[in-house]
Amino acid sequence: MEDPVMLLNYAIAFFSLFTVIFFLLLFLRHKDEYNVPPKRTGWRPTVSIVIPAYNESEYIRESLQTVVNLDYPKDKLEIIVVDDGSIDNTFDIAKSFGNKGVKVLRKENGGKGAALNYGIEKATGELVATMDADSYLTPGTLLDLLPLFDEEKVAAVTPAVKIRPSGSIIKEVQRVEYLMILFSRKLLSYIDCVPVTPGPFSIFRRKVLLELGGFDEKNLVEDQEIALRMQANHYKIRSSMTADVYTEPPKSFGEFMTQRVRWQRGGLRNYWKYRFLIKPEYGDFGMFFVPLNYLTIMAFFLLLGLLIYHTVSMPSYVQYIFIEALGMSVGMFTIIGAFVVMVTMFWLYVTVRSFDNEKVKLRYVGLFMILYWYFMVCYNVLTLWKELTRAKAHW
């Protein structure tokens, strides 16, 4: 009988290869179309942009300036800022845009989901765009997103969320990550498996939001939960690679960890809540994407456990003469592992090359490859600890 540890090694290697190769094949199938902007149409619906804001005085001025500069008929555009009980001068800055058509509402602090719902109730547009107050649009963002509402069942369209170049290591590593997420989300849209409607500037059919009851006000990642609810109700979500929106990432490792732990905790809860989607009636999303998420989480913690096991059980000569010992113990698993790493590096190369205008420096791509595994270990272990100890979560 095979060693159970070795069987787990092979299972994780197979899963990794399957996932990477699946996305590569999906890319090859759509390589001539994924990065081509959809042809703009003459459709100009009324659009309400709802911007929840809590203590965003550092960013909201520039954010609102990009909104009022949108290339879109002003009589078809409604801009609503919902100040969620800020204690800085966010409200005053937003009010200064009143002469540019910005409506500013104020309410007691209740969280982002509550602020979004408050704004959506006041909105009058056929479409509603939700926008984080630390995000920045490009003039053509809205016009590039509208053509993706190409059928009635499309309930939401997501933009190309990116991070501006900064020179900061922590921000540049996240910048590479955001490009990978964007690239993967676009490919997933071809099989109707988009799992999130990002806060920076996703656009929704207002009637669908109202039909579904708006955003979950107690959810840690309300933009993911609403997407899963749409999938559960057989709506479609499209994704753009060319409608650029830039967002502010965490500035420090501590802020990054806080954000990612919240995302991970919210994600775990959401996918457990929507586990009923694993049925043929939910198509590829239910039979492929949701199980893939469960398997990814399991594979990560199994891999972490195996690494700890191998380190603890490693003979002393391997620990002290690591490189030489590796050369003495090359086996099938070592070969598979090396292949997985090479395929992953190729995937990262394809991703970055897909965004020629982003000019990502090679050193930051290398740092991403080196550092991101350790980042994942930190925030996933912390996520598990906080969930097991029922630590209070903040949004």
Image: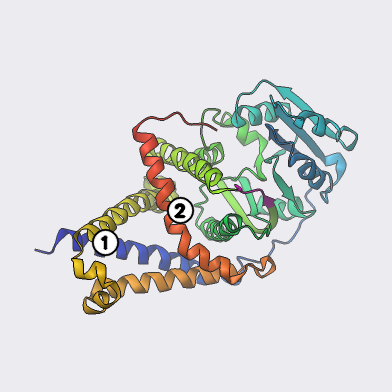
Is 281 rendered above or below residue 220? below
Q: Main SS of the magenta segment?
A: loop
Q: Which mark is residue 11?
A: 1
Task: Tell me which label, 2 or 1, sits earlier in the chain.
Answer: 1
Give the Cα separation between the discs numbered 2 and 1. 24 Å
Q: At x 60% / y 52%, what residue is drawn?
A: 238
Picture residue at 41% right of the left edge, 35% below the top: 273
Quarter of the image where the N terminus is located: bottom left
Which quadrant of the structure image shows residue 240? bottom right
Q: Residue at x 73, y 42 (%)?
A: 59
* Residue nearest the viewer, comparing 52 with 206: 52
- Extreme residue in the left direction: 1
Residue 392: quadrant of the picture: top left
Residue found at x 22% / y 78%: 328
Q: Which residue is mark 2?
A: 375
- Let me know if residue 243 appears in the view: yes
Mark 1 belongs to which amino acid?
Answer: Ala
